[in-house]
Amino acid sequence: MNRVGLTVAGVVFIVIGLYYGVEWLRFVSGSQVTTAVVERVESMGTGKSGIETDVYYSYRDSQGQLHKGKDNVDGTPPCKKGDVVNVEYLRNNPQVSRLYHNRRWWYSIGFLVAGIIIAFNPFGVRDIIG
């Protein structure tokens, strides 16, 4: 891969890392944790880390309004229908939620580090790759 291609790939990784970072910051700075009831769990086959599962749940915000949510998890399903789980939702936008344990802050760091290494070549990676 030529230098321009590596730079573009690195910038794409950085943009993805920034996206995950902004999402993480939105939840860290403005979320509320509550309990939810799992309505259904659907396994979607296997992905890179094994089974991918959609978990559908319902919860009430601090105003008592009922919301429905869905989150995708990798690996063995963490719950089953009828279980009570912790979710976090955005206080200023309560319909946006995710399972509490499903914090993917490391995605941001991983994509940012990879993007910086590929785009800006601080360790001679381009010389090794191409």
Image (spheres, rainbow, N blue to C red):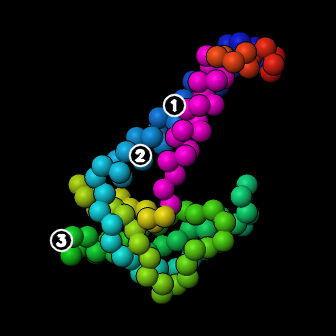
Q: Is residue 24 above or below residue 60?
A: above
Q: Which mark is residue 3?
A: none
Q: Is residue 25 visible?
A: yes
Q: What is the crowding at mark 2: few (fewer than 14 residues within 10 Å), some, or many (at least 20)?
A: some
For the record, the magenta segment spans 102-120
Determine which residue is flagged by label 3: 63
- Name which quarter of the figure residue 76 lies in: bottom right
Q: Quadrant of the N terminus?
A: top right
Q: Secondary structure at mark 1?
A: helix
Q: Looking at the picture, which amino acid does disc 3 mark? A: Gln
> What secondary structure do most residues of the magenta stretch adopt?
helix
Q: Secondary structure at mark 3?
A: loop
Relative horizontal placement of residue 9, taking residue 24 as reference (left or right): right
Of the two numbered discs 3 and 2 on the same chain, state the one appearing first in sequence: 2
Relative horizontal placement of residue 130, taking residue 15 as reference (left or right): right
Q: Position of residue 104 (x, y in %)?
A: 52, 52
Of the two numbered discs 1 and 2 on the same chain, state the one appearing first in sequence: 1
Q: Looking at the picture, which amino acid does disc 1 mark? A: Val
Q: What is the crowding at mark 3: few (fewer than 14 residues within 10 Å), some, or many (at least 20)?
A: few
Determine which residue is flagged by label 2: 23
